[in-house]
Image (tube, rainbow, N blue to C red):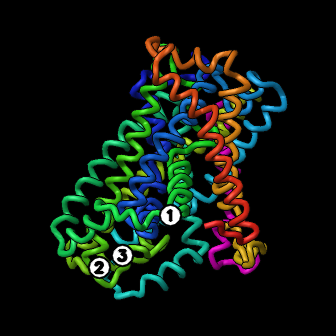
Amino acid sequence: MASRGGFSNRLGFIAAAAGSAVGLGNIWKFPYEVGENGGAAFLVIYLACAFLICLPIMLAETAIGRNTRLNPYGAFRKLGGRKWGIIGIMGVLSGVMILSFYNVVAGWAFGYFLEIGFGGLLSKGLNYGDHFGGFVSNIWDNLFFSIGFMVLTALIVAGGVQKGIERWTKILMPLLVIMIVGLICYGLTLDGASEGLAFYLVPDFSEINANTFYTALAQAFFSLSLGMGALITYGSYVGKNDSIVGAAALITIADISIAFLAGLMIFPLVFSQPSIEANAGPGLVFVALPGIFESMGSVGPFVGAIFFLLLCFAALTSTVSLLEVPVAYVTDQFKFHRKKTVYGVALIIFIIGLPTMLSQGASEFFTKFTFYGGKDIDFFTLIENVFSDLSLPLGGFFIAIFAAWKWRDKGFQKELYFGNPQLEGSVTEKVILFMVRYISPLVVGTIFVISVLKIFFNINLF
């Protein structure tokens, strides 16, 4: 523990892990998923999936990490042998590849913050759809923005667990909440805010179908950073006296609370402009919202800049955890110097992300990189499909199977008792074990199969 470092206390772990969970998935992806899947009905299903399916897998990841004090590969190999180490390698690789494209999107948010706050973007009377297309295809601007974001991420991770990750997440998370609440208060003063709240908060259960469950679970899984080894890595820095059951519950609550607040922030803004559709999809943030900010007049640039700064903060708390996964792997397995490892790994991941950056129009080769599912696929979508849509649920499936069946007699249940001895023999313990053994792997495994059919064979089962 002394050589690897560790969180100073339980709050430090909760703040860091919640920061890992809270990111673009909450502020950017969650609102448009809600808009495309029926509003409040989707929200209800999302909450159920987060607690019933994802929370048990989070406990399994954290327990594996704390027990072994190792990175995902080292943890699985120590507890399960060489064959299980492959699952850890898959998690590390997923973290690397997800960060490679996540950093590009974070660079977009950083660029929009600068353009709106200091570049007078909202005063130019632009078509924001065309502007976004030109923005993401401008390789030189994107290089600058993405380099800046990766450097900032590396500087935080290089500071170590306590002085880097823990210190900055304790600063960024409260700032993020303050900014969201401020934008919510402003949005509620706009015309149309009540319609936005009704769409978001009043469920219409006729909107629920099988696809709602599928999308909600996939969103919860991505949002909570499961299946990629991030929580195994963070769990390896947690003390034995801390209850990981209570911490996991608080992390889940923090994550869904930020996602919920993001919806309260977005939909009053969206419904204040009748010309903007709530189901605008991924372009809701980068295409629809700038037009809304422009319509606010003189206050628009300030509100818009604050929003995209908020998006940057949310992204940063996640890029930090994503970078820590391969850094922990390299330092544990090869005993390299931590700071040199951080900067070296960050550089490699940035280079890996260049094809993703080029795939948004700057290079025809990467824009039409491959073909499956009946259409041309750009490099960005390929990486997202393989390492986010498929690798994460597959990793979560194997983590649940490993903890519940392979490792159970060697410590999973015992690991849950540390810091929480009253759990032994309780109803809560029985529910957790039942979910990890049967429900979570069954549901997540089904999600993986459905995703394979949908992505590669264009077979929609719903």
SS at mark 1 in the image: loop
Across and down, in percent, residue 105 comes to 54, 63
> Which residue shows up at 65% across the image and 66% down it?
461
Residue 362 is one of the magenta-drawn residues: yes
Q: Secondary structure at mark 3?
A: helix
The amino acid on which the numbered mark 3 sits, given as a three-letter code, is Pro
Who's the residue at 25% across and 73% down the image? 300
On the rendered structure, is 184 left or right of 399? left
Report how far apart the C-alphas of labels 3 and 2 lie in the structure: 6 Å
Marks 3 and 2 in Cβ contact (< 8 Å)? yes
What kind of secondary structure does the magenta stretch mostly adopt? Answer: helix
Crowd around label 2: few <14 · some 14–19 · many ≥20 (10 Å): many
For this orientation, the residue located farthest to the right is: 82
Q: At x 65% / y 48%, what residue is drawn?
A: 393
**Residue 222 appears left or right of 39:** right
The residue that mark 1 highlights is 209
Q: Residue 5 sits in which quadrant?
A: top right
Q: Position of residue 260 (x, y in %)?
A: 35, 53
Whichever of labels 1 and 2 marks the residue nearer the N terminus, that label is: 1
- Residue at 58 percent across and 43 percent down: it is 226
Mark 3 or mark 1, which is nearer to you? 1
Q: To which residue does mark 3 refer?
A: 290
Using the image as rendered, state which of residue 250 and residue 114 is in the foreground: 250
In this rendering, the label closer to the viewer, 1 or 2: 1
Quarter that holds the N terminus: top right
Q: Which residue is mark 2?
A: 294
First in sequence: mark 3 vs mark 1: 1
Question: Which stretch did the figure color magenta?
Answer: 337-365
Residue 110 visible in rendering = no
In this view, which residue lies farthest toward the top? 421
**3D distance between C-alphas at marks 3 and 1:** 32 Å
